[in-house]
Image: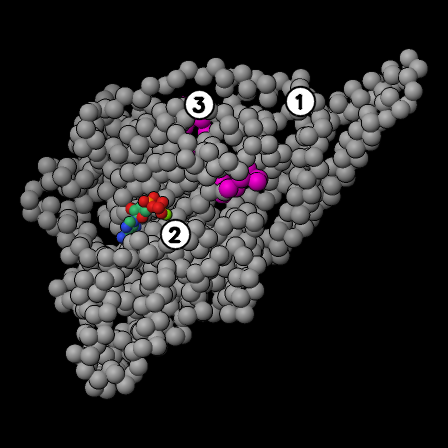
Amino acid sequence: MSKTRFNAISAFSGRPKINVEMPSEKISDFYAESVFSDKIIKEYLTKESFSRLQECIKGGTKIDRDLADQVASAMKAWALKKGATHYTHWFQPLTGSTAEKHDSFFIPKGTGGIEEFGADALTQQEPDASSFPSGGIRATFEARGYTAWDLTSPAFIMTVGHGKTLCIPTIFISYTGEPLDFKAPLMKSINALESAALEVCHYFDRNVNKVIATLGWEQEYFLVDAAMYYSRPDLVMSGRTLIGRPSPKGQQLEDHYFGSIPERVYSFMREMEIECLKLGIPVRTRHNEVAPGQFECAPMFEEVNLAVDHNSLLMDVMDRVSSKHKLKVLFHEKPFAGVNGSGKHNNWSMATDNGKNLLSPGKTPRTNLQFLTFFINTIAAVNRHEALLRASVATHGNDHRLGANEAPPAIISVFIGSYLQDVLKMIEDRIDEESFDEQENINLRLDIHNRIPDILLDNTDRNRTSPFAFTGNKFEIRAVGSSANCALPMTVINTIVAEQLKLFKKEVDALIKEGDYKDVAILKVLRRTLKESKRILFEGDSYSDEWHQEAAKRGLSNNKTTPEALKAFITKKSLELFEGLGVYTQRESEARHEIMLINYIHHLQIEASVLSEMILNQIVPAAIDYQNKLINNIRGLKEIGLKETAYKSQLTLLETISLQIEQIIKTEEKLRTENDKAHHLSEVQKQAEAYCEKVKPLMDSIRKNCDELEAYVDDDLWPLAKYREMLFAK
Ligand code: ADP
Ligand code: MG
């Protein structure tokens, strides 16, 4: 009998319930209590220092040393009062998770000591950068990097067990100023978008002083029992099951989606939410997802930099809280074959400092023109850089969703709903250039759309198959993988829209200069832009074969694998885009591209090696055990003189199993050879392609045999937790 698996099953069935108490009756009593928020800062700083700090944050200006010292000592006083003993610069290196290096506030001096924390410790630190990926940047430049305080994202206290640490959100850059993380380029893209959008906003409203990009993510995840998780080497090492026969009951009944949340999961969710709320992460919704064992949570949207930090933090918190509940949260895009994978929808929009959502249709012709401006320009940006957007979500895990048998496809298209389609058609067909003669006329014509806000929300019929959908007052980027850092797709969307808005402004200004009324000029350029971008709009079923053919005709890219998709990151068009808007220099783009390829390679290498181990150490021995059982049985039957017709089927079974075993052993050997060959290739692109084209198919082939074998081998002997045990354990 396979001990690990059955131990896991019995561990799981004896789990005691964990009761989660609310820290207080009302959430507002403890919301953001672990955040060094404005409210707290006000208590600790003088009025004058507080407003100087606000100016630095809002204006993006540099903070002087004196003020940094005051903030540091305020932070220290607050953190010590809250029981923190250590502090850390918290950052998001390109490895995909978050990084921390804790230092104690306490400095021993003689037989005593004091708690210290000043401007230097707050603003800059030097973690050992050599173990973080830099894509060759560090090799050619100085081998050191440093973290620098991001004052736009508030510091917070992270509690792990009884330990409390003050975390300071930072960017991570090399000594030559090149970013080594996700956050620094994101912040540059935010600046680019904000200034481009502000200028366009001024066509409509001179009182706008600032535009911000907003993000509201929806995080999907799976939960499995911790004992099951640890009994599966593939889950522990690669985050997904590399083999495993689909359970007889999968998601076909769709009873999980509508079902109530299992009690154990509910406890986990409550505790996770309480921890998030203390950290100021505005989580609001929770529900079951389509696949069994799959769930989702979503917050209220926030400014994009903060929202990205909060999503990273959420993933940390979920991981920790799940362990406490003897569960394990899986962020992998496709932990289980045959059931839905997980994504992270990124709802994105832009808003003004006077509270207007720029992607929310207005009540007057003028505000509608403003809405249409941002709406159409976003569509145009996606059209121009569809391949880059696809590249921004390309990872080994997401390859199992995009371009595989599951939504959304690898083809980027934009869904806008039937009503807006009509509106756009009207602009294109019914408003001709001749009628663009006077303001009155424009007003009259745009007045047609007065009713947009009343019916829009009902009309954004939920096309679940679209990778980029307009959902009433924001765009929802559904192609993002569940394990991804939102920063990269957000960096790309901010940058491409910034570029498009700049182009738009240039064209409109030129027409105005030639004598057109402002609104006339705007509508003319919008109409032209729309015509040029139409191929990206698609309302139908994105999974259908017809769409794949149609998209090819329209010249849209369909890059199904990461090594292929990532190429779009370093095309001339993308390099110029990033460099032109100051987001990445050419070298940085190339370095990122290399890092992403290396990530891909490493993950596939790990998967292939773990699979080899599981085959040799677990699957083949179990199958041989069963083979022996059958052999002995048949031999026994023969010995007592039974006719062969009495055990003919057993012979067939034995043959089937023996052939499967043979096939698996042979393919595993090939897998090892190809894994080794790929590993030793010198060029990164070639290496990634070898893993994709040579190694991956062998893994798929082994899986097929193993999953068939699982159907035959004695359940008592099968060493790995089965799908039904992992997915339906409640
Ligand atoms: P659904 O699952 O139906 O798509 P949810 O309510 O779960 O919808 O998620 C909608 C998400 O969109 C939430 O995270 C919400 O905060 C976010 N959102 C709403 N308005 C905006 C906006 N203006 N900008 C960015 N995100 C937004
Ligand atoms: Mg959604």
Amino acid, disc 1: Asp
In contact (CB < 8 Å): disc 1 and disc 2: no
Instruction: Report if the CB atoms under discs 1 and 3 are less than 8 Å apart.
Output: no
Q: Residues within 10 Å of mark 2 (few under 14, many from 20)?
A: some
In the rendered structure, find residue 462 and report the number of the disc placed on it: 2
Residue 209 in view of the camera:
yes
Task: Note whether 654 is above or below 426 in the view shown.
Answer: above
Q: Tag 2, which secondary structure? A: loop
Q: Which residue is mark 1?
A: 715
Task: Choose the circle earlier in sequence order: 1 or 2.
Answer: 2
**Judging from the image, what secondary structure is the residue with disc 1 in?**
loop
Q: Amino acid at mark 2?
A: Arg
Callout 1 environment at 10 Å: few (<14), some (14 to 19), or many (20+)? some
x, y (%) of residue 585? 40, 63
Q: Nearer the viewer, mark 1 or mark 3?
A: 1
| Nearest to viewer (mark 2 / mark 3) | 2
State the SS at label 3.
Answer: loop
**Residue 514 or 53: which is nearer the viewer?**
514
Residue underneath mark 3? 326
Mark 2 and ligand 1: say if the CB distance to the nearest ligand atom is below 8 Å. Answer: yes
| Quadrant of the rendered image containing residue 72 | top left
- Residue type for callout 3: Lys
At 33% across and 64% down in the image, what residue appears?
A: 420
Provide the residue span drawn in magenta. Answer: 320-340
